[in-house]
Image (tube, coloured by chain):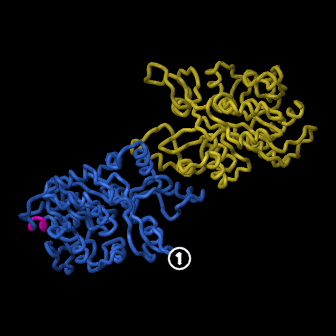
Chain colours: A blue, B yellow
């Protein structure tokens, strides 16, 4: 344990984090570590644009990644899903010829989806379902889906065997084709009509620090920011909004952010992503932007700072969070 | 392998069997054995009154018991479910506090239910779903649910902790309370309104032998016979209808038929069950009734015969079927 920050920045009491899946989860481990040191509460607003229905089960990959990570159940070696996972159900589904065969559902994971699907079918909101699932995992962070309405990212691309472009679910593009097919754009179905939940709006309104995790800036953070009312709330919150880049020296920390950025015509650099998010003073969402040493540069209206950005473990990541808090202090 | 029957009975070509779960499945192993010897086709009309929705999954215990048995996947040691079964999902569901905890769903079994539930949700009939599942198991017998409409057996009883009688699902009575609570009756919800499928009616109309398996005469066979149009079709078929008793010397071959018979006020003997089914000539369903040696006696309008009734293996069971064919020949 490191000592609480000794900088002169005001210590935040209510931290809100916008986050995607595994990258967001690792970042949240550091935020939780920092928050424990200073006695702050953490709320994570998590992307649901990757959600999908597989074999009739509602799967929320980003919410589950965050929940399993914070609950200590994430399989670090495999990089996704739960540790000690088994694969009987998936094997049997393939024996029945039941697709999709490119999406692996572990047995432990299936229990999560069964509980979720049954609660959703019974009329509970995804927000309530997530809270119910979290009673088991005790993540120490309040997890909120960005919306209770269905938003699904589809990808306009040409898939093998097809002669012209069509739209496939993000999961198929990501998991089945490893983002390796000619791709022209993302379509977030339902995004314009979807509303953030009251809990999300309340969290943003009551925050004294908003952090944007180094998650995929296009399909994770970009989707969250694409909710019109959420973007408005983010622009209106009295709290400083500090983002942390998920790319170092032009390469993503993890995942395929560079590929996604290429699709939307943004250079895969920390600075280009920060400029794409933009300053709150000029219609964007950022007050401060944390980048790796050497990745800095000017962004109109945004305080850009350099700091080590490797999320090796919660303590290292907490140092990144402390750096973001320092930036926040200097944006006031 | 035994030689084909040398009796003078006409060899049936299209055999229809009314069957419940494990007992019906074991009987069908013998029917299939016999049918292979004589080149006959077998259709099983299976009880669906035990079906239930657990964790949002549609579970059809009798259809699955028959399917797994005939597909060579049944766990003979445990007495139900699939061999090599694992239990990860169920364990995780309990960790989430998701009930019912008294009903064990194996991982392999869950794959079956996922495929079924998804197909039903997509609008397929249970008949079509069953056929689709059977393409994997190749049971060698055509499996037909008795109806595509929902029929659910509930039990009027007093459960522990309750002061007055209420109705609980048959599975709860059977699996959770082991039929060991004060019980006053069975209510087959939806039975009066349910229709047998066109496939069931066609099978009965085209049969040249109908066998009633030694399944539970109350909650398995009794439920099938409770479908008004099925009972009519059974009474109208030109084929002889031969039942085989599931009790020997007043004790059930397996299961808790004696308890169920007690609830409806029928003595737990082969003869009492045969009388309860009754003769086709007097408003019942039987032409012949096969009982164990020493269990015989008169039933008005029914040819009662004695034969060894132990279902030790498919060959022994095939001998029971051969005995039923002989009885059929003598009822013509």
Q: With B105 as the anchor, is A135 left or right in this view?
A: left
Of all chains, the one bearing label 1 is A
Q: Is residue B142 magenta?
A: no
Q: Position of residue B96 (x, y in %)?
A: 39, 45
Asked if B260 appears above or below B7 in the picture, the reply is: above
Q: Main secondary structure of the magenta part?
A: helix
Residue B74 is at least partly visible in this image: yes
Mark 1 secondary-structure assignment: loop
Q: Position of residue A95 (x, y in %)?
A: 60, 58
Magenta range is: A326-330
Q: Which residue is situated farthest in the right direction here?
A: B8
Q: Which residue is mark 1?
A: A163
Residue shown at 58% from the left, 51% from the top: B84
Q: Quadrant of the N terminus of chain A?
A: bottom left
Q: Is residue A327 magenta?
A: yes
Q: Position of residue B211 (x, y in %)?
A: 77, 36
């Amino acid at each position: 344990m490191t000592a609480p920050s000794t900088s002169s920045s005001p210590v935040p009491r209510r931290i809100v984090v916008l986050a995607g899946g595994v990258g967001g989860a690792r970042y949240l481990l550091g935020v939780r570590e920092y928050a424990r040191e200073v006695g702050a509460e953490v709320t994570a607003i998590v992307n649901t644009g990757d959600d999908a229905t597989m074999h009739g089960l509602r799967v929320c990959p980003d919410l589950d990644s965050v929940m399993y990570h914070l609950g200590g159940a994430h399989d670090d070696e495999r990089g996704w899903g739960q540790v000690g996972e088994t694969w009987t159900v998936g094997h049997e589904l393939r024996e029945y010829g039941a697709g999709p065969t490119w999406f692996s559902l572990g047995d432990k994971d299936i229990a999560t989806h069964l509980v979720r699907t049954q609660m959703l079918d019974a009329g509970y909101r995804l927000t309530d379902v997530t809270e119910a699932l979290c009673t088991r995992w005790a993540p120490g962070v309040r997890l909120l889906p960005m919306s209770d309405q269905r938003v699904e990212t589809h990808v306009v691309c040409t898939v093998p065997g097809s002669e012209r472009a069509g739209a496939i679910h993000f999961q198929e593009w990501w998991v089945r084709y490893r983002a390796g097919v000619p791709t022209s754009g993302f379509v977030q179905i339902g995004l314009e009509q979807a509303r953030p939940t009251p809990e999300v709006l309340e969290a943003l309104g009551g925050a004294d620090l908003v952090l944007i995790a180094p998650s995929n800036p296009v399909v994770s953070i970009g989707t969250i920011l694409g909710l019109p009312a959420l973007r408005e709330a983010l622009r209106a919150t009295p709290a400083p909004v500090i983002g942390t880049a998920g790319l170092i020296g032009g390469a993503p920390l993890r995942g395929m952010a560079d590929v996604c950025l290429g699709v939307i015509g943004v250079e895969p650099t920390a600075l280009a992503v920060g400029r794409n998010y933009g300053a709150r003073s000029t219609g964007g969402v950022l007050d401060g932007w944390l980048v790796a040493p050497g990745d800095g540069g000017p962004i109109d209206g945004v305080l850009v700072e350099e700091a080590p950005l490797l999320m090796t473990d919660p303590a290292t990541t907490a140092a990144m969070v402390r750096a973001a808090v320092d930036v926040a202090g200097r944006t006031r």
